[in-house]
Amino acid sequence: MPRRVQKSVIQLSFFLAILFVILYLNRPQSASNRIFSWTKIRYKTSSSIIPEARGICPGLAGTTKPALIVSHVAADGDTSWLKPLSAHYHLCIYNVDAPADKSSKILQVPANRGHEAMAYLTFLIDNYADIPSAGAVFVHGTRFAWHNDSPDYDNAKLLRALDVRRALQPAGYHNLRCDWSAGTCPSSVPAQGSLEMRLSSAVSPWSARAASDLALPHALGHIFGGDDEAVAQRVVEDVVQLGRNDAVRAQCCAQFAVAQERVWQHSRAEYIALRQWLLDGSDDGVARNPQGGSKAAPGDDVVAGRIVSYIWHILFARYGDDGGINLEGLNRDSCPTAEECYCRLYGRCTLTCKGPGTCKGQYAVPKYYKLPEDWEKTHL
């Protein structure tokens, strides 16, 4: 065999061997029988300082309305749009970037960290015993936002139309989005730990979404596996950490309704542990005893907040008789068809829907995922 041909054959064989290894490592795997131990938050902090309870929502214990928990920052503008909603909800508005008032224990958060997650977790911790029997709804503090699932992106209209009782049937949890365009529900979205996601993160290092997706598998192991390396690394039975081809399918943007019993399936100590996971990873000195680079949340606040936004549906999922979470069932419950969702949540039951993830005239992703600066003025 001529030397040139021999060299080409060797190179081709080497290439095919590498390709085979890549394909083997990323071969499809069925999630139908995979049960994950995502039923208990096991993260252990090494910090000796746990924030005091300063996030009490006044009057919550006596309400018969669903609680409306709002994570608000100054950039969201005024909160006057929320006042008319008090006819339907018991309002709990957290101004997360306001100066701390050490003389008060009302509606404060320990740090502006993890975006909306800090307000949500603080509410769950400091009002744990008083979660209304009618449930709770968690939202962001701006009225008009690109991710609000309404033709004009108006959260006030969505919340007025929302049927909380039906939203909580039968699962006890529901994301407020119905359109699939911004989440991980479509099968075309790669699994979080896949080679495709790794490549995406490598070529787009500025993408918070890619960084968050890539960090999710290990974060799940740290949050639900804690200090038990044996638990955190098991990948056959009683799984904690996602495999390369296990995809978590869910809606985006961390606005949802949850039932009282779903909140109470975790202890108050577990919510404290999850909040500490955020605080311990802080790179701004909030944690006092930071664990950056360890099992704590990533220091990048956007990435840390996005990771938590991916796990609310896991925290509030229905657990099976085996005491675990079936990934296939979780994904199915988290991604109802848009047609079913719009009807159940908002009473829009005569829509024309193209495929499972979108209905005509209901939602479109705005250009660059941003609304025009004058949107609120022109739509009030």
Image: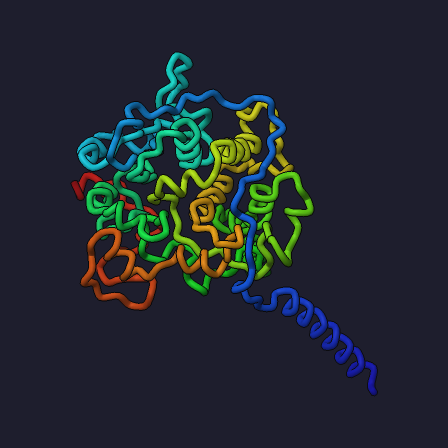
Report whether 70 appears left or right of 250: left
> Relative to the observer, which residue lies in front, 112 or 7?
112
The residue at 40%/55% (across/down) is 334
Q: Whole-percent x and y of residue 250?
A: 42, 54
Viewport quadrant of the C terminus: top left
Report whether 131 appears left or right of 160: right
Q: Whole-percent x and y of residue 63?
A: 26, 30
> Relative to the observer, which residue lies in front, 319 or 141?
319
The residue at 20%/47% (across/down) is 161
Q: Whole-percent x and y of residue 375?
A: 23, 43
Q: Name the residue at the top extreme.
A: 103
In the rendered image, the vertical position of residue 320 relative to residue 75, given as above or below: below
Q: Whole-percent x and y of residue 107?
A: 35, 24
Among the 4 quarters of the image, the one containing residue 145: top left
Viewport quadrant of the N terminus: bottom right
Q: Name the residue at the front extreme.
A: 321
The residue at 25%/55% (across/down) is 344
Report whether 261 appears left or right of 240: left
